[in-house]
Structure formats: structure tokens, C-alpha cells
Image: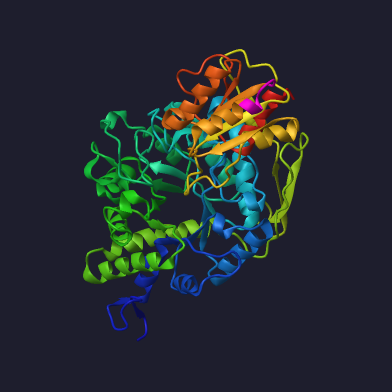
Amino acid sequence: MSGVTHTAHDTVGPFLPSALDEAAHRCLVAGFEGTTTVPDTLKRLIDRGLGGVILFTRNVRDAQQVRQLTDTLRALRPDLLVAIDNEGGGIGHLVGASAPDVPGSWALGVVDDPALTARCADALAGHLASLGITASYAPVADVQHRPENPIVRTRSFGADPGLVSRHLRAWIAATEARGVASCAKHFPGHGGTVTDSHHETAVDPRPYDELDLAPFRAAIDAGVPMLMSAHVVFPALDPDRPATLSPGVLGGLLRDELGFDGVLVSDALEMKAIADRYGEAAGARLALGAGADQVIVAVPDLATTLACRDALLDALCAGELAAERVEEAAGRVRRLAERYAVRAGAGVVECGPVGAGAGAGVLGVGAVGGGPGAAVSWDVTAGLTAARRAVRSREPLPAPVPGAHVVDLFPLPHPALNWGGEDLLTELRALDPAATGTAVAGEPENAESVLAAALRAAEGRPLVVAVCDAELHPWQAGLRDALLAARPDAVRVSTGLPEAADGAGVVCSYGRGRVNLRAAAEVLAGV
């Protein structure tokens, strides 16, 4: 039957015009498994108009492989958006592809030099462009409002909306200059919650006039082409539904009041705030109906993506989802893809080491700044420069501690965010081979044995005790306090948000990205 199609789970009907079927597919962003081949199911989705794919660590082996993968994907459909989470700091999926090392956003806010923030964003965006990646789900526009917030923290530029706004503008402009689409997230803000929406429903109880909308206004004024919605309930805006599913938040507030006409993409639908209460498929239908233009299904199991797709098609057939709404959304996605499409035929980036000499750059070949085959370069020193400038203490900084024993305490990497698992000891030993120690990732089964072993190993030498957000992780606070009770001379390091009780001499890196830890290690080693 010409000009019509049907859902994958029905061999007969319901039928839709092919243009509307393609429009519905445009509204989906799919995760998948694989580094070199494209699954057949994904090929079929792309053939029917899939709007985008999202890459994760599972899709990354090295720079050449990523470029070949993106070329393969775009050969299937030239206007396919290829996206990735690329915030910097400890959150990124391109370590294997020699991604530039930059600190997390909080450290950039501490330095408060928007030009330096732009240099860091430029490095990240230049690398993406060289790999054929079209869109970056960054920067984070959330304001870190609650000290007990478990998910935003050093991903935010800070606790002041004005500071966050000026760094957003710098980041967005630098990314745009590279021809990569940026995405400010998570609208209308995740910083006022005490819950991680990856795990359960999050609520921001503040009244409307206290919500942190200023950074999103700044991002829109700066021309950000995409915003990502938050799976957060705002009773002042909609007491029943999270923002991702709320017509009042997405339509009334974002479109009508703030005037945003770019692509609104949902956070991943498999996050528990959506999946547990609504299910991914119903979430996809509700999000599109509420005003989202694309929904992300990040899990690699394409059966989930198919279920979401089928829910959209069935809702269109049943009249539960207006064709005009889907066509409007697909039109925005098409315009985004036309604007940021990466030309095929470009080459591969080759990255240099962290801490290269002043003025050093990383050269690669990409479709940026002069057409296919043009050289792409960026400042590989920007990230370490920023991290060094961010390290500080309530004066004075401690004296160097050569040959120290380090106990580095930090939570297990967040499965959706942090894939690096970097540790302070590794960075310190690169500068001081005499350093020893242990990295404790996650609560140990026997804290007493960790304590005893550390104290034995530190006899007759300096002791360094590092924590990361210890106020959220009592096991860290307990171990730290026990170590300090036995060794009050120990040097303290904070690699997350500093605690209110942190006093003089605590070395604060404001993040656990590799350059954050390297900059703290330089203080300890005296280099």
C-alpha cells in the first residue's frame, strides 16, 4: 500500500501516512549497543526517519572507531543527529577517544573567568566535531540550590543564578562557533531537589518566584538550540506531573512565557522518575503531547525504543496524540539537523597529553571552519589551567607533603554519568613516585580494616585524607574522622562540594575530573 505504514507489532494496521510515520520517528533519540556495526533494528528505525542516536561509553573504543561509526550512521541518513553527554569534569563518555580534559562546571564557576570557560567548551566541541558528533547534551543550567542535592552538585556552575548565566552564555557561544548543537539542561531546574530523578521522583517545593529560571532565560537569549527537560515535579507549576510530561511547564512556561522555539528534548525515559510511574512507552506519548520535540531512550535494548515508537504511532492512529503536534516537533528537529549536520568524509582527531606546553594544540581533520578536510585545533592547556586556578583553601594552602600516603574516599561512579573512576593517588604518583596509598571507591565491607591498614602504612610519613561529598556519604565522614583522630596532622582534600565545616588548609578541587585531581596533586607534591 503506497504512502502508508504500520506499527511494528501489527502485520495489519493501524496505518498512517508515510510522512506522519516519519515525523513520529523524528521525535525519537535511541541508544544502542556496538562500536563498529549498526544493529539491523536501528537501521530500520533510521530508514523510517529516526531523529537521532545517543552515544555512551559502550559505543567508544578510540577516536578513529568513533569517527567511522558516526560516518556509518550518517551514511544511512545524512540528517541523523548524533548526540552525547559531554559536560566535562568526571562526566563524559569519550575518555577512550582521547577527549580533552577539562574540569567540571563548578570549578569553572569558582574561577569565574567566562573566557576560560569558553576555551574549555571550545576544546570539547572541537573534539566532538572532529568525531562527527552533532550535538552535545551540555551545559548544565541548574543552580546548585540545596546542599543535600545528590545529582547536580559540581555539575553546576554554582549557586548564584547570575554566575551560572554568564558561564552558560560563554559555553553556548563557544559550542555554536564549532558548529555543534549545545543543550542547556534540566529545564526548569534540578538544583532545588534532594532526590536524584534517575532513581525516583524528584520534587522542587519552592514557589514560582523562587525557581531558578534566570539561567534558562540567559541560555535562550544566547541562542541555545536545544533544552532538556527535568523529570522533576514543581507543585507551583504542575502539582501532578513532572516537567517532562507537563503541558503547563513545556507549553505555557517554556514556549509561551520564555519564548523558546528550539528543540526541547526529554531526559532519558528509562530514568525511574518516568519509568516506574508511567512506563517508558506512556512517557514518550505523554511527553510529546505535553510539548517535547524529542524523547531520549538511552538504554541499548532497542525493544524499549520500539515500544516507545509504537506507543506514539498507536496514539496518532487513535487520535490521542495530535498529528499537528508531532509534525510541529518533527519540523523543529529537521531544522536542527539541517543547521548542525556534519559533512561526511572528514578525518580523525589525534589528541595530545594533558599538560602540554603553553600554546600547544591538538590537531585533527574535521568538517569545521572551512569545509571538509579543514584542520581542527583547540587549546589542550585550557582544562588544566582552569583546574589549577580553581584549587584553593581557606588560607593558607598546606605545605607540600612529599612521599605521602593517600587515602582517597569517593562514591562509586554514577552509572549514568561518571565512567572514569579517576583517583587522586594515580595523579599524585605521576608527580611523586614515592607516594603510596589506596583509592576506596564505595563503602568498604570492613571500614576498620581500611582504617588500620592506612594508619600502619602512614607511620613515619605524611598522611593525606581525601573525600568527595562526605556529607552525603556517612561512611566517608566516619573514615575521615577516624583517620584525623589518629593523625590530626593529616592533610585534608575535598574533591566534591566543600562542606560548611571545612576550615583552613583543606585543599578543595571542586570536582573529580582528571585535571581537578591533577591540580590538587600538584599542590600536595609542591610542583
Please tell me whether the stretch drawn in magenta is mainly helix, strand or loop: loop
Q: Nearer the viewer, residue 357 or 271?
A: 271
How far across and down, in percent of the image, does residue 349 sit?
70, 54
Residue drawn at x 27%, y 70% as measured from the top left: 314
Q: Quadrant of the N terminus?
A: bottom left
Q: How is the image coloured?
A: rainbow
Q: Is residue 269 above or below residue 220?
A: below
**Residue 460 in magenta?**
yes
How far across and down, in percent of the image, does residue 522 sit?
69, 27
Q: Is residue 330 above or below residue 422?
A: below
Q: Nearer the viewer, residue 297 or 330?
A: 297
**Residue 474 in magenta?**
no
Residue drawn at x 50%, y 27% as measured from the top left: 479
**In the image as oriented, which residue stretches furthest toward the bottom?**
1
Q: Is residue 337 above or below residue 430?
A: below
Q: Quadrant of the C terminus?
A: top right
* Residue 161 seen in this snapshot: yes
Picture quadrant where residue 436 is located: top right
Q: Which residues are magenta?
A: 456-461
Residue drawn at x 28%, y 46% as measured from the top left: 242
How many numbered discs?
0
* Residue 382 seen in this snapshot: no
- Left of 159 or right of it: where is 201? left
How far across and down, in percent of the image, does residue 295 sit?
38, 57
Picture quadrant where residue 113 is located: top right
How far across and down, in percent of the image, does residue 205 sit?
26, 33
